Amino acid sequence: MLGVARQAVEAAKAAGADYADGRVVAEESESITVRNQQMEGIDRSSSEGIGIRVLVNGYWGFAGTARTEPEEIDRTAHLAVEIARAASRLPMEPVHLAEVEPATGTWHSPMLEDPFNVPLEEKVALLMEATRRMQTVDGLAFAEGGIDLHKTRIHLATSEGTAIEQTSVHSGAGIEATAIGEGELQRRSFPNSFRGHISAAGWEHIAKLGLIEEAERTATEAVQLLKAKECPSEVTTLVLDSGQVELQIHESIGHPVELDRVLGMEEAYAGSSFVRPEDRGSLRYASPLVSITADATLPGGLGSFGWDDEGVPAQSVPIIVDGLFENFISSRETASVLGLPSSGAMRADGWANFPLIRMTNISIEPREGSLADLIGDTKDGVFMATNTSWSIDDHRVNFQFGCEIAWRIKDGRLAEMYRNPNYTGITTEFWGSCDAVGGREDWTLWGTPNCGKGQPGQTARVGHGAAPARFRGVQLGVRG
Amino acid sequence: MPGIIGPDEVRRVSASALELKGADGVEVLFMHEWGGLTRFASSSIHQSTFREDTGIRVRAIAGDRIGVAASNDFSPDGARRAADSALEMANVVAPDPMFPGLAPPAQVPDTQAFDEATSSTTPHARAEAVAQLVAQSPEGFTAAGAFETLASEVAVANSEGQFLWAPATQASISTVMTGPDHASGFAEVFARSAAEIDPAAVGARAGTKASASRAPRDLDAGRFTVVLEPSAVSTIVGFLAWIGFGGRVLAEGRSCFSGKEGQRVGAEAVTIYDDATAAGTLGLPFDFEGVPRSRVDLIRDGVFVDGVYDLRTAKQAGKATTGHALPPPNPEGPFPLNLFMEPGKATLEEMIASTERGLLVTRFHYSNIVHPVESTITGMTRDGTFWIEDGEVAYPVKNFRFTQSIIEALTNTESIGRDTELASEFFFSASRVPALKIASFKFSGRSDH
C-alpha cells in the first residue's frame, strides 16, 4: 500500500502540488452488544481508501476516494490540486510547514492476543455471563454489556520522503446497569461509562477488566440510586474519581490547548479557546499540584502512535507544569506560526478526512495517595464518579458536567449516596482550586474513542491518564 | 466528478449478497455519498476537501439470529464477503426473540430530491460563494464557516423482494463572524440545492448580528422570558428526538414521554411532527430497513400523541412501524430525522416587541442531557445574546448557561413564530422550526464573553 501512497504523491506533484502526502488507511471494527442476556447487535465493518493532501502556492487541498486503482488515484490527486487552487480565491498568508526529518519505518501498538482472532462465542459468553450476574439484582431494568474492537492500518508517503506504515489495535469492553422507577432513570457503568474501558491492546485487556466480578455491585448501585437523595445544590469540596477527571481534562484542558482552535481555525464549529498564543509560560492554568503531559508514546494509549499523519514522530510534550501553561499541541502548519516545531498531533479520521490537531494521550501526572487516602483526608464534601454528561462553552471557559453517582464525604468516610450529581465551574478557577491529586496506584490510562471535531465531522480516538483529584469551593447540584 | 451509480448496478452488486446460501433472510443497505466542503476561517479558505465513499451493510438472518457486516468495497465480491461475514456471526450468536422479519415489498414516490448541479458543484464555485459571504464582513471583523455540497444515493434490497432506491442532494452554508470586544454573529442555511442558497445574504445576516453583539454586558443568571431564534429552537426539538420520541425509549420507560400518551406536554399551540417526505426538509422517502416513511404526529396541540417506530420496536409495542429505522444493528432503536414544529403567527419583531424584559438568543452550543426523564438539558448561548427591554433589543449580554426542562419550556411557550428555518445543533439532523417566545426559561450560569 505504500506504493499506492507514493503513486498519489507523484500524481499530485505532476499536477502542480508543491507538497503532497498520500495516506492509505484500512480500518476494521467489530462491535457486540448484549442486553438482558439477549443479543442486541453484532456487527463488523471495514473501510479502505486514500486521502491525498496537497499544498499549491501555500493553499491546502484535499481529496479522498475509496477506490485505489491507478486512474482513480490520478483523478483524485488532480482534484486535490484543483481544490487547493480554488482556495486561493481568498488571499491569505501562504501555509508554511515546520521542518521535520523525513521518516521511514513501521510501528505497531502493543498487543498480546489479537482480539479479532478470539472466537465470537467466547466474546458473547463473557457478555452473557456479565449481564446474567447483573440480572440477579432485584429491581434492575436493563443489564447491558458491550465489546468494541478496532484496527487501523496506515501507510503514509510524503513528497519530502516520509514512507511509514503503522498499525493500531484497540480493544474495549464495559457493562451498564439501568434501573427505572418513580420518574427516575439511573445508570451505573463499569469500568467507565459509554461502553467501558478501551485500550491500545489486545484481548488480554478485556480479559482482565473484571466485568463479571463487578457486575453485581454495578447493578446494585443502579438500583440503590433510584431511592437515593438528589445531590444537594451547594458550594463545597468535590472529589472526582479517575474516570471523571479524564473527562474534565479532555474538555477543559485537552481541547483548549489545540493550537488550531487557539488560532481560530475551529471558530465556526465547536468554537475557539480562551488560551492565547502569548499565554505560553505565563498563564496560571491550575494549582501547582497540576501537571499535564501530552504523550503519544504511552503504551496502551488510544492516542499513541509511531508518527502522526504528517510523519512527525510521537513525542511527550509538557502542557502544564506545576500549574503553569507551557505548550500547545500542534501541527506543522500551526507550529510554524509560532516559530516552533510541531508537537506531532495531526491525525485524521480514516482516509476520507483532512488531518486535524487531535489530542494524543493528555494526562495528569500522578502525585500521592490512593482514592481512599484522598477521601480519608476530606472532612466534608462530595465524591462523584463516572461521567454521564458534558457541556462547555465555545471558549472552553464555563462548563457543567454530570456524573452517575455521588456520596457525601463526612469526616473522611463515604456517607449517604446522592443521585443526579453535577457540578459547574470556570476552567482556570476550577483547576486552580485543585488541592490534591492521587498517586500512581489509582491512575488509569483511559481511552476516549469518540472525540468530535472539524467539518466534515471527524471522530478521534484519544487517551487520558487520570488520577482521582480534589477541588475546593465547587458549585454542585445545578437543577432545571 | 463522481455521479450516480444507479439502481441497476446496485441490484447487480446486491444480488451476490442476497443469494447467500444458508441464510433465512438477507438485507442489503447501500449508501453512496460524494461531495465537497470548503471550510474557511479568518476570512480565508483553510481546509477544503472532497470525498467519495460507498458502503454496503448486509444483515444476515439465521432463524432469529442476526449478524451485520459492513464494507466500503462496492463490488459483487465485496458484497458477498460482507454477507458471508454477517452469516458467520449470525450462526454463532444468541437469538433475538424480538426479530420482526424483513420489510415486505412496497413502493415510495419519487421525491425529486436530487439536483444535478448541486451534485457536481466545483471547488471553484464553492470558493466563489464563500468569497461572496466573506465580503459581507463588517470592517474589522473576520468570517469562519463552511460551505458544503453533498450528493448521495441510498438503497435497501432484501430477500423478501423489497428494493427501494433514492438519490438526494443537499447544500449548507454557515458562518460565525467575529470582531472586536467579543463581537460574534451567526447565520446558517440548509437546502436541497446550492442554487437555493444566497451566500451574501447569509453573510449579511451574520455580520449584522456580530456588529450588534459588540461589547456584551454582564448580567446575572436567573429565570427570564426568552425569544429563541430558530437555531436555538432546533436544539430543543432535536433533543426531543433523542430522549423522547424513539419507540424504544418510550416502550422501555426511558423517554421523557413514557406514560404520557394523551397528556399535555406543551402549550396548546405546540405541534411537532416528523415527515421525511414533506417539502422543506432533507429526508429520504424510506428508512434504513426499507419501510416507506410518512408523516407522524408526535405532539398535537400540546398533547403527546406517540413516538416513532421501526419493525422491531413496533413488534415490541404491538404497533405498526412508522418507517424510522436507522442502519442496523442500531441498539438505540428508531429515531425521527425530519422533525417539524408548526409555525404560529408572530414575526420575530412582534415577539420582541411584546417582551417587557427578557433575552433574545441566537443559538445554543454544546448542549447535553442533565435528566432524560425530566427532559432537562444544559448548554450555552453563543454568537449573539441580547437583553430585551420595553419591547426593544437593548444591548448585547455575555453568554449564559441554561439548565432547563424541555417539557416545561414547551408548556411555557407564549408565542410561536410564523417563519420557519431548517436548523440544527451539532449532533442532530436538521429540524424545521420557528422562533419561540418562552416564559421563565432558566439560565443557571454565565461565561466571560
Image (spheres, coloured by chain):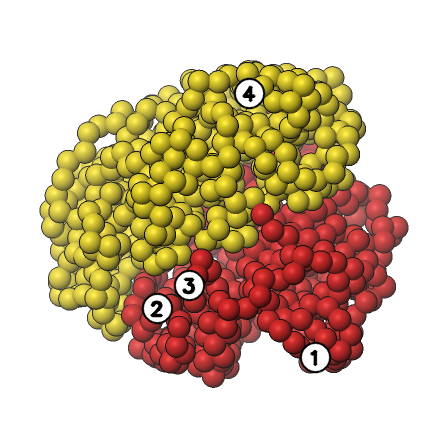
Chain colours: A red, B yellow
Q: CA distance from mark 3 to mark 1?
A: 29 Å
Report which residue position mark 3 lands on: A181
The residue pinned by badge 1 equals: A413
Q: CA distance from mark 1 to mark 4?
A: 54 Å
Q: Which amino acid is tagged 3?
A: Gly
Q: Residue at x 61, y 41 (%)?
A: B442
Q: Nearer the viewer, mark 3 or mark 2?
A: 3
Q: CA distance from mark 2 to mark 4?
A: 48 Å
Same subunit, labels 3 and 4: the answer reads no
Letter of the chain that mark 4 sits on in the rendering: B
For the question of whether residue A192 can be seen, the reply is: no
Are there few (<14), some (14-19), or many (20+) residues within 10 Å of tag 1?
some
Residue B446 position within the rendered picture, expressed as x and y whole percent measured from the top left: 71, 41
Look at mark 2 in the image and give the residue it sits on: A35
Image quadrant for the N terminus of chain A?
bottom left
Amino acid type indicated by mark 1: Arg
Q: Earlier in the sequence, mark 3 or mark 2?
A: 2
Residues B74 and A76: in front is: B74
Q: Mark 2 or mark 4: which is in front?
A: 4
**Residue closest to the far right:** A282
Pointer 1 chain: A
Please indicate whether residue A335 sits to the left or right of residue B385 in the image.
right
